Image (cartoon, rainbow, N blue to C red):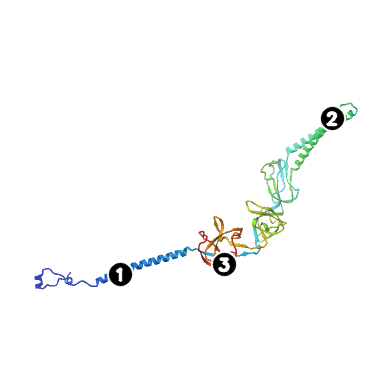
């Protein structure tokens, strides 16, 4: 409970009925004013310090942003390579001779004697065709030849008789000439009938389907009882025979290497089914023309295939050992290339640390690397993995010294 107020003197109570606390009779405190000034000063210093700190941070941020805006690049230095490099290209293996055998006469397959994979000799019977219509035509032609021959004999007898009568002035010259002309006409009929018989007899020989050369049967569509017709469009043929004792290998060589190909030069051929085995081939000839679509020269290699390890239609790789380039070849990794509107380009850095664009032409695309034909000089500092936004004359920062080598 609150304590009671102190007792007032009797005289005070009479003079003043109201009581005034003692603390109200004291004077004002002198320390309050300096404290307020100090507080204001501290607040002002805090505001000024914040403004200065913000300015310093903003300037630092601008500096950092300006430094960060300069791209950091890695440099490589391509070197001229004068060493002989093998040229490896895809190749297409084909048989030295390949023939699709079509029927020359219409009829029915009577029998077939060989199937796919069979090794055949020249003239070996492959199938036999039954041709009843052709047989009847031949019989009719022979009968027509006999008739024409008989008429020729009668005409000859008449012509000879009229010739003797003319010598005795028993007949006129006109009648003799008519009999002679009739004999000539009958003789022509005999020649025509004989030619028709010979033609049908030649067609009769096509009833036997035979191998045109030594080789392997690679396809068969002949079936017993099947109707075949001569001259049918898009006919795949009854058999396909390929000569695999010697093969032709076709390679499409880029135009840049066409001048280095000479007939007789050797090439090595590899196929996936015989890893590690190398087949030696020779360059027989070239097309002597660059394809308008491919931009490549077609080269033909020839190779003996005594064990028939290589097969027509094989996918192969041909390797040429080209002579070293006199001026050397510049190589760069594909990662250094930039695709620009004006063409293929690379970025180089000068001594002042500024980037410049060099538009180049590629001599040969090797996949992971490319050979440069024009637009770049040995010893230039080339940017590897350049940023897409790189502009000519832009300031760059070099992350590492240039590395000498072939990229």
Q: Earlier in the sequence, mark 2 or mark 3?
A: 2
Cα separation, mark 2 vs mark 1, equals: 154 Å
| Label 2 crowd (10 A; few <14 / some 14-19 / many >=20) | some
Q: Are marks 3 and 1 in contact (CB under 8 Å)?
A: no
In the rendering, at what x and y percent does residue 264 appear? 72, 58
Cα separation, mark 3 vs mark 1, equals: 62 Å
Q: Which mark is residue 41?
A: 1
The quarter of the displayed image where residue 105 is located: top right
Relative to 270, 356 lies left or right: left
Q: Nearer the viewer, residue 236 or 79?
A: 79
Cα separation, mark 2 vs mark 3, equals: 106 Å
Q: Nearer the viewer, residue 335 or 3?
A: 335
| Label 3 crowd (10 A; few <14 / some 14-19 / many >=20) | some
| Label 1 crowd (10 A; few <14 / some 14-19 / many >=20) | few
Q: Earlier in the sequence, mark 2 or mark 1?
A: 1
Identify which residue is drawn at 44% across, 65% down. Answer: 63
Residue annotated with mark 3? 403
SS assignment at label 2: helix
Residue annotated with mark 2? 177
Q: Are marks 2 and 1 in contact (CB under 8 Å)?
A: no
Identify which residue is drawn at 31% across, 69% down. Answer: 42
Mark 3 vs mark 1: in front? 1
Mark 2 vs mark 1: in front? 1
Q: Nearer the viewer, residue 316 or 179?
A: 179
Q: Is residue 385 visible?
A: no
Q: Is residue 79 above or below residue 185?
A: below
Relative to 174, 105 lies left or right: left
Q: Earlier in the sequence, mark 3 or mark 1?
A: 1
Q: Is residue 334 above or below residue 127?
A: below
């Amino acid at each position: 409970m609150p304590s009671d107020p102190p007792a007032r003197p009797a005289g005070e109570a009479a003079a003043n009925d109201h009581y005034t606390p003692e603390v109200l009779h004291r004077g004002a405190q002198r320390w309050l004013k300096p404290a307020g000034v100090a507080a204001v000063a501290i607040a002002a210093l805090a505001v000024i310090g914040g403004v200065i700190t913000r300015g310093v941070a903003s300037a630092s941020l601008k500096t950092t942003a300006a430094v960060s805006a300069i791209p950091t690049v890695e440099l490589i230095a391509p070197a001229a390579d004068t060493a002989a490099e093998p040229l490896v290209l895809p190749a297409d293996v084909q048989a030295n001779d390949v023939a699709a055998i079509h029927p020359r006469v219409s009829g029915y397959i009577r029998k077939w004697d060989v199937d796919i994979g069979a090794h055949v000799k020249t003239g070996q019977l492959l199938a036999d065709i039954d041709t009843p219509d052709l047989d009847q035509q031949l019989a009719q032609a022979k009968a027509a030849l006999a008739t024409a021959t008989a008429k020729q004999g009668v005409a000859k007898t008449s012509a000879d008789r009229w010739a003797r009568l003319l010598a005795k002035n028993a007949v006129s010259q006109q009648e003799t000439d008519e009999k002679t002309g009739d004999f000539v006409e009958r003789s022509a009929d005999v020649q025509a009938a004989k030619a028709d018989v010979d033609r049908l007899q030649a067609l009769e020989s096509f009833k036997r389907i035979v191998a045109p050369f030594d080789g392997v049967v690679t396809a068969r569509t002949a079936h017993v009882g099947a109707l075949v017709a001569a001259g049918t469009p898009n006919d795949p043929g009854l058999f396909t025979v390929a000569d695999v004792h010697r093969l032709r290998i076709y390679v499409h060589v880029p135009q840049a290497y066409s001048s280095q190909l000479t007939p007789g030069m050797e090439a090595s051929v590899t196929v996936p089914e015989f890893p590690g085995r190398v087949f030696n081939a020779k360059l027989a000839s070239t097309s002597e023309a660059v394809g308008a679509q491919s931009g490549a020269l077609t080269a033909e290699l020839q190779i003996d295939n005594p064990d028939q390890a290589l097969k027509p239609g094989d996918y192969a790789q041909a390797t040429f050992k080209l002579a070293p380039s006199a001026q050397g070849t510049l190589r760069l990794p594909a990662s250094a290339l930039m695709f620009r509107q004006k063409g293929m380009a690379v970025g180089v850095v000068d001594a002042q640390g500024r980037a410049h664009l060099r538009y180049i032409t590629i001599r040969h695309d090797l996949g992971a690397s490319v050979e440069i034909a024009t637009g770049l000089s040995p010893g230039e500092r080339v940017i590897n993995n350049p940023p897409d936004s790189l502009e000519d004359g832009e300031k760059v920062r070099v992350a590492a010294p240039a590395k000498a080598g072939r990229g």
